[in-house]
Image: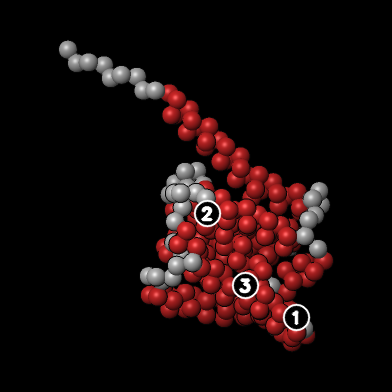
């Protein structure tokens, strides 16, 4: 007579469910509620301060997590073969954005380098350090590691990371910024997924960000940031 399998201990499942619910609530609070409060004017801390406070907190959590590979923050080994493809995508995107901007937003085409060259150079130099550095930590290194159980497959993680990145830009009150960062979010998340290199994904982020500031659409972000 076959024996009946022993009942499984419900405690691990309960603990797993509890952790999943906690992570889901944390994800929504950080990547949805926070930007919405800023968008609605309920909270208006300086944006760069917010980026750095959250980024440093995320970095501290990762640094003290024994399951996190710290080398993924800066390693470039194995990414050499992807440089050509990354630059090719960027070149095509640059031509496309330049053409669309010249046709549909002609007053913004090359506005920043032509009208505010000093500010443009400042943005080119500081944007990678002041903005992209911590965004890379939060939206890629931290998000991919912290919420890997919530989004366990690339088909769930990449859309989640892209949506979080795009929705974070509602604070600019400009839906073009949200649309552009949704596309960028997919590209950067895919790059991080394929390379597991935060630095390489951030390099791609810098290329696209500085391109947008130069060609035209990014000027809306500069203006919005200066207003806040």
- The residue nearer to you, when weighing 104 against 129, is 129
Along the horizontal axis of the image, is 130 left or right of 91?
Answer: right
Q: For residue 213, which numbered disc appears in the image? A: none
User: How crowded is the residue under tag 3: few (<14 C-alpha within 10 Å), some, or many (20+)?
Assistant: some
Q: For residue 119, which numbered disc appears in the image? A: 1
Hey, which residue is sitting farthest top in the picture?
A: 1
Q: Quadrant of residue 105?
A: bottom right
Along the horizontal axis of the image, is 74 left or right of 112?
Answer: left
- The residue nearer to you, when weighing 102 against 68, is 68
N-terminal-most mark, 2 or 3: 2
Q: For residue 128, which numbered disc appears in the image? A: 3
Along the horizontal axis of the image, is 93 left or right of 81?
Answer: right
Is the residue 207 above or below the residue 30 in the image?
Answer: below
* Residue that appears at 61% across and 67% down: 132
Is the residue 220 above or below the residue 185 in the image?
Answer: below
Q: Position of residue 39 (x, y in %)?
A: 76, 53
Q: For numbered disc 2, what is the local secondary structure? A: helix
* Residue that appears at 47% across and 43% down: 149
Gap between marks 1 and 3, in whole Å? Answer: 15 Å
Which residue in the protein does label 2 denote?
A: 63
N-terminal-most mark, 2 or 1: 2
Single out the mark in the foreground, 2 or 3. 2
Q: Position of residue 5 (x, y in %)?
A: 28, 19
User: How crowded is the residue under tag 1: few (<14 C-alpha within 10 Å), some, or many (20+)?
Assistant: few
């Amino acid at each position: 007579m076959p024996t009946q399998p022993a009942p499984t201990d419900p405690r691990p499942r309960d603990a797993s469910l509890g952790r999943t619910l906690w992570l889901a609530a944390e994800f929504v609070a950080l990547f949805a509620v926070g930007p919405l409060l800023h968008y609605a004017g309920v909270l208006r801390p300086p944006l760069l301060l917010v980026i750095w406070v959250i980024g440093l907190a995320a970095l501290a959590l990762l640094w003290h997590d024994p399951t996190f590979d710290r080398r993924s923050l800066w390693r470039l080994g194995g990414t050499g073969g992807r440089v050509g493809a990354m630059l090719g995508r960027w070149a095509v995107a640059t031509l496309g954005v330049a053409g669309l901007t010249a046709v549909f937003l002609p007053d913004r085409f090359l506005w920043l380098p032509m009208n505010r060259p000093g500010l443009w150079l400042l943005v080119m130099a500081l944007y990678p350090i002041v903005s992209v550095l911590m965004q890379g930590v939060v939206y890629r290194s931290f998000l991919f590691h912290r919420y890997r159980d919530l989004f366990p497959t690339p088909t769930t993680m990449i859309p989640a990371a892209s949506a979080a990145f795009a929705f974070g830009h509602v604070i600019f009150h400009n839906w073009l910024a949200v649309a552009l960062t949704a596309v960028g979010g997919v590209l950067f998340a895919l790059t991080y997924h394929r390379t597991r290199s935060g630095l390489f994904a951030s390099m791609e982020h810098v290329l696209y960000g500085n391109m947008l500031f130069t060609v035209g659409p990014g000027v809306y972000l500069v203006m919005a940031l200066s207003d806040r």
